Image (tube, rainbow, N blue to C red):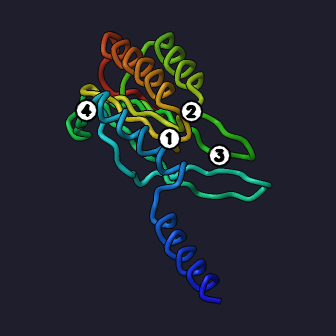
């Protein structure tokens, strides 16, 4: 009988220790955020949410924002935002631009962002960019995303369009 009591006590202590250890998912996200910090990103929760559809049910998942450098939204020369949104039963990409980009640059940026696949949105500013995702990718994917977005950000800074885009 004493052996059973000792076994139960040891089992409850082991359960308590295992309960406070991070799960594999939490370890993966910690490694991803650590890699992001070494790449020069700041990582934070944001107020944007992504609509996930599982078995016909809609769920709102909080997005995590990775910013390339501290970005000041006010007083920027341009802001271009591409977000994946749920509309009429499918995901579409919505482009909001406060800058006249050439059609070729706008099409290239849209196509390249859509090709990334693991992000739900991106905002480009003159001083940097932010991207939004659910942190479901690997650290290798993070490096690929960063390289692609760095390239697109440089392309938009080099594009000759300036000023506000006219809304008709």
Residue 98: percent from the left, percent from the top? Answer: 37, 31
Verify CB contact (< 8 Å) between mark 1 and mark 2. Answer: yes
Can residue 168 be seen here? The reply is: no
In this picture, residue 51 sits left or right of residue 97: right
Residue 106: percent from the left, percent from the top? Answer: 49, 18
**Residue drawn where x is 47% and y is 67% of the image:** 17
Give the residue at mark 2. 118
Can residue 93 be seen here? The reply is: yes
**Residue drawn where x is 61% and y is 82% of the image:** 3
Give the Cα distance between marks 1 and 4. 17 Å
Give the Cα distance between marks 1 and 3. 15 Å
Give the residue at mark 4. 69
Give the Cα distance between marks 4 and 3. 29 Å
Tag 1 secondary structure: strand
Q: Residues within 10 Å of mark 2 (few under 14, many from 20)?
A: some
Quarter occupied by residue 15: bottom right
**Residue lying furthest right in this view?**
55
Quarter occupied by residue 6: bottom right
Give the Cα distance between marks 1 and 2. 7 Å
Which mark sits nearer the N-terminus, 4 or 2? 4
Verify CB contact (< 8 Å) between mark 1 and mark 4. Answer: no
Residue 73: percent from the left, percent from the top? Answer: 26, 40
Verify CB contact (< 8 Å) between mark 4 and mark 3. Answer: no
Quarter occupied by residue 1: bottom right
């Amino acid at each position: 009988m004493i052996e059973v009591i000792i076994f139960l006590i040891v089992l409850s202590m082991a359960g308590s220790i295992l309960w406070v250890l991070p799960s594999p998912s939490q370890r993966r996200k910690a490694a991803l955020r650590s890699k992001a910090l070494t790449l020069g990103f700041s990582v934070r929760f944001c107020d944007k949410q992504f609509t996930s559809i599982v078995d016909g049910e809609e769920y709102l998942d909080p997005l995590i924002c990775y910013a390339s450098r501290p970005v000041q939204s006010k007083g920027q020369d341009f802001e271009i935002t591409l977000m994946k949104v749920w509309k009429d039963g499918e995901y579409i990409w919505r482009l909001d631009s406060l800058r006249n980009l050439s059609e070729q640059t706008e099409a290239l940026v849209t196509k390249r962002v859509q090709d990334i696949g693991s992000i739900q949105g991106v905002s480009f500013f003159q001083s940097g960019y932010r991207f939004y995702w659910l942190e479901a990718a690997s650290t290798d994917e993070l490096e690929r995303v960063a390289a692609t977005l760095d390239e697109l950000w440089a392309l938009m800074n080099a594009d000759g369009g300036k000023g506000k885009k006219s809304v008709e």
